[in-house]
Image (cartoon, rainbow, N blue to C red):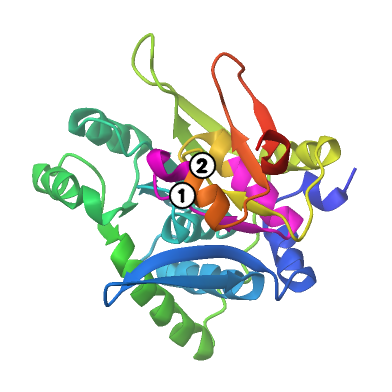
Amino acid sequence: RDPEMSRGLGDVYKRQATVFANNIAFTEKVKQDNETVYIDHTYTNLLDDINAFGTSLYELGLQGKRVAVIGHNCYQWSIAHLSNMLGGIVSVPLDKGLQIGELENSLIRSEASAIVFDAKLKDVIEEIKRNGKTNIEHFICFTDVANLIDNGKKKIEEGNTKYMNCKIDPDVMSILLFTSGTTSKSKAVMLNQRGIATNIYDMLLVESFYENDVNIAFLPFHHIFGSTGMLVMLASGLKTVFPDGLRYIKQNLLEYKVSVFVGVPIPVSYTHLRAHETS
């Protein structure tokens, strides 16, 4: 058993950023001047962005606090979640499909001090902000993430390495998530990094992933299977891309030459398929 995997995730991904430095970790598809542009983020870029965003979170006084993340799967979601985990901030992933009352209740129950949210949810977040029932002090839209990364890089250049040098206890809560609540009110679940790292290691023991693989982040990251899948891919040095939506999944599989797909088809509770095996 890999001793690093029995500890926290920080050392693991710092090592991966060296081993797979020039590999592409994520590819974003964005619209610029009515044109589709693909932005590649290498493993080195990813770690730099995590350190910078995390430094900005520390500057906001969020060290040791809880930060919620809500929205569609994207690079900004990944940066927020990973920055939380690698900086000792409890990450609170929330379902973007929650009704406003349940979302507000989840923020109250989680005692989150900040939320990083999708621009599509701006009206809902604004209403929650006006209600003033939560402990949220900082409302960070996905569109603000780039600015916070830039500000964090400046702080690091000035000598602020507090975030980068933080020590993580792998046995304390790192993620606070909520169950779907199909039978009653959603239940809070506390997860630590030792347990998550063990899941990643176990997955790598039973499945083969390769550096030249391309994974598509189909499952929602707010679900622990989806976010753990993301971590497994990063531990393997391969590339993750984001789907444009369920109706475009076939198109995206071909567009990105996807070779790894993690899903939960009915009635089977779990599957890991390679695209070339099912095409």
Q: Is residue 249 left or right of residue 121?
A: right
Q: Quadrant of residue 40?
A: bottom right
Residue 243 percent location from the top left of the image? 46, 49
Q: Quadrant of residue 108?
A: top left
Q: Is residue 259 visible?
A: yes
Range covered by the magenta-colored residues: 228-249
Q: Is residue 49 magenta?
A: no
Q: Residue at x 67, y 34 (%)?
A: 278
Q: What residue does disc 1 label?
A: 243
Query: What secondary structure is marked by label 2?
Result: loop
Q: Is residue 229 magenta?
A: yes
Q: Residue flagged by tag 1: what amino acid is it? A: Pro
Q: Nearer the viewer, residue 226 or 132?
A: 226
Q: Residue lying farthest right?
A: 1
Label 1: how many Cα within 10 Å (few below 14, some 14–19, many 20+): many
Q: Residue flagged by tag 2: what amino acid is it? A: Phe
In the image, is residue 116 above or below residue 165? above
Query: What secondary structure is marked by label 1?
Result: loop
Q: Residue at x 67, y 56 (%)?
A: 234
Q: Residue at x 76, y 37 (%)?
A: 203
In the image, is residue 18 above or below residue 250? below
Q: What residue does disc 2 label?
A: 218
In the image, is residue 44 above or below residue 99? below
Q: Is residue 3 left or right of residue 42?
A: right
Q: Name which of mark 1 and mark 2 comes first in the sequence.
A: 2
Q: Is residue 191 left or right of residue 101?
A: right
